[in-house]
Image (tube, rainbow, N blue to C red):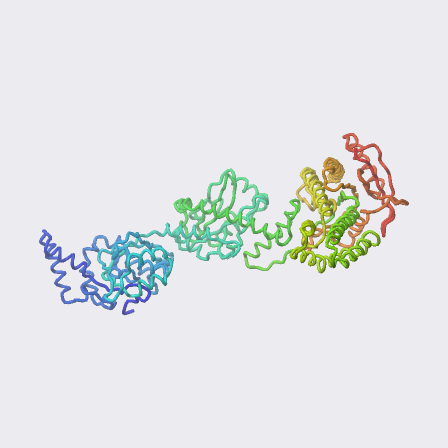
Amino acid sequence: MSELDTNNSPFQVFISFKKYLDVLEHIRYNDRLEYRANYAESLIERTKNFKELREGFQDLSLLEKHDDLIRLLLADLFPTGLTRNEIKAASIPLANITFNYTERFRNILSDAGTDFEIKFREIDDDEFYIFCCCLILQVHFSTDLRATLPLYYDIPNKDGIIKHYKITVNSDFTDVYPDKDTKIPDEDTVNMLLENIDDIRLWKKNFPPQSWILSGFAIISLIDCTSEVALSDLKSTLIKVDLEHPAPDENLKEIFKSYFDVPDLNFGLMLFNKKDKKLERLPIYENVFTSHILDFWLNTFDEEIRKTAFENINYNSRPIVISDIDKMDEEVKNMSSFEILKNTGIRSFMVIPIMKDGELMAIMEFTSPIANSLNGLKLKKMEFFTDMILFSLNRFSFERNNQIEAIIQREYTSIHDSVVWKFRNEAEKYFNAFLSKKIYTLKQISFKNLTPLFGFSDIRASSEKRFNLMKVDLNHQLECLYEIFTLINSDSEKYLLALEIFENELNNEIKADTEQRFQRLLRDEIHPYLQGKLETSATEEVKNKIKTYISQITLQNQLFYNQRRNLDESITLVNRKLADVLDKSQVQAQEIFPHYYERFKSDGVEHNLYIGQNISPDADYSQKDVHQLRFWQLETVCNMEIEFQMFKQNLPIPLDIASLIFVYNEKVDIRFRMDEKRFDIDGAHNSYYEIIKKRIDKAHIKNSQERITSPGKIAIVYFGLENQKEYLQYINTLQKKGLLKNDVEFLKVEDLQGISGLLAIRVSLA
């Protein structure tokens, strides 16, 4: 490049030594020391024939042409005694062009290689342009902006480690002034610009490219801040990990090389799974981390030794630092596992447990094939970012759990706590595959060989009540319409006739579509007619009647719905009360043995329990647990009935409930159905259980029209005498508690389609 490129700058930049030559002129005529005055005069005389040094130039080739003269001219600013220590050079202001290097700076550039091009680190073009404009405001307008943009050079050393140098600039020998045709912004414009600091178009409009002159030279000094910059980069990398868009920073290893000043360094990290007592990889960094020591440890020792080691770490979490494995004890070096370690090329390593509140959270390792490259001093540097590692791991675990929960909610819906572990295992596999950008198909979730418990507390005759209340609502609506049309009298005969037909049909020979046809008549004819009457000169009595009528209809279906609304509210209150009793009691049931529990609310509350070793593999399971849960179920259903009796008188519509428990001894399998987002019986061989559940709801006593369920009584349906004996013991216990009466009935259930031989016990609540 023979000329300066200033297209993306508000400046025309000229290299000039005028201000420094002016300093020499002052020394020449005013310094009391004669040798200093003579020295200044000699330098001025040497530059007299090279006017471009004072007037300024843009031809970069002149720097090489006058290299010796410039070095001599700037000798006072670059003392020979400091040339091997200071990293210093002259620079063209605000440009990546330097010259007149100290010996140390020249050696740094030489180690970087001939292909290396020095340039500022990570500066956006627009940001740099606005920064230059702010310098104009600061210098020319004397605006106190304190405009500083941290400038860095990233320069590799001879080992390839990136070293970071912060640049300090001395601009004593530079001038800033407008070009001859430049329009200088007024104070209001300057304030507007400062209010819109990121609007590059606005800044370029008021400070066009090359509209100002920047003349002179600067002196830059470099300070090695590799550790500080690497530490900052490390913190930024750890903070910015986004699990929704995982993109690991491939430069993480290079950051650690710079920070520890080790040219060949590998880094590994594994999370500690407290529940399973094992180490787990971070899939997001699978291609970045190389956990040689941790892999070796996991693959060499058995599970018991590893678990013991994890327990010991909680008591003694001191890091392990081996500077040179060849200097380890002979006893260790003779172990076969030592050869495996040496064959991986490791000569120096550190293993650091990451602890939180006295418990192991993760283990980090640093390894290098260079002996003595890792030691206690390197370990000391860990202290500066250990807190950030902890913060990042905490954040990763928190967001990881959130993502896994989101997968469960999205793919499986809300899952009962007793089985969530199996969904979580599957979701973790899915999530880890996602982080590794691999394809993973979610597997079906199922549990086998479970003992089912089923029961319901059904609102008796709810359909019949709803039908009767529908008739009450519609008859009331018909009465109101009769009153209105009778008052109107004129041109209402056809509506009165239609209402009479519907009233007769409703109360005598109602049809499946009676309500729908009535609704259609209201929507298409009667209600538009009444709305028209409100807008005409009808009497106030008629208008008030119409307004009262309209206030009672529902906008959705144009019908009166007051009594049915009361019924819906009553059913909702009953369902809520019964479900609350059942859910609260379930907390105690889970303590007997963890099991899958679900309930459904419709016209009453139905519940299912599935018990078995597969639900909770880590718990001790026996038939005794089934017996305890069967007793819990019977007692809970009794309590639900008692709670209902206590608040039934407060219902808007009187209701009764009838409760039933079905006892089934055969084992069943359940499977989560992805389409319905719920568990259901799995396999044709288990369908018999579901058929019985659906058909006993309204079953009768054999050779009778009486249903086996009855308000105020608990019905227990079963197959064999063994179950009868078991439940009589439970009933006896509850009678002693005062929950049940001594009126046990032994019943046979009518034969249902494909089902015969069912027996029942029925007993009244106390």
- At horizontal 85% and vertical 52% (from top left) the residue drawn is 754
Relative side of 504 to 70, left or right: right
- At horizontal 36% and vertical 63% (from top left) the residue drawn is 201
- At horizontal 66% and vertical 57% (from top left) the residue drawn is 536
- Using the image, determine if residue 148 lies above or below residue 66: above
Residue 384: x and y in percent read: 41, 45
Pick the quarter of the image with the N terminus: bottom left
Pick the quarter of the image with the C terminus: top right
- Using the image, determine if residue 370 lies above or below residue 359: below
- Using the image, determine if residue 251 lies above or below residue 702: below
Q: Residue furthest bottom?
A: 2
Q: Foreground residue, 242 or 271? A: 242
Residue 277: x and y in percent read: 57, 44
**Taking the image as drawn, is residue 157 in sight?**
no
Residue 316: x and y in percent read: 49, 39
Residue 436: x and y in percent read: 54, 57
Relative side of 192 to 462, left or right: left
- At horizontal 80% and vertical 55% (from top left) the residue drawn is 500
**Taking the image as drawn, is residue 521 in sight?**
yes
Q: Foreground residue, 747 or 322? A: 747
Q: Quadrant of residue 634?
A: top right
Q: Foreground residue, 426 or 316? A: 426
In this figure, what is the number of numbered marks?
0
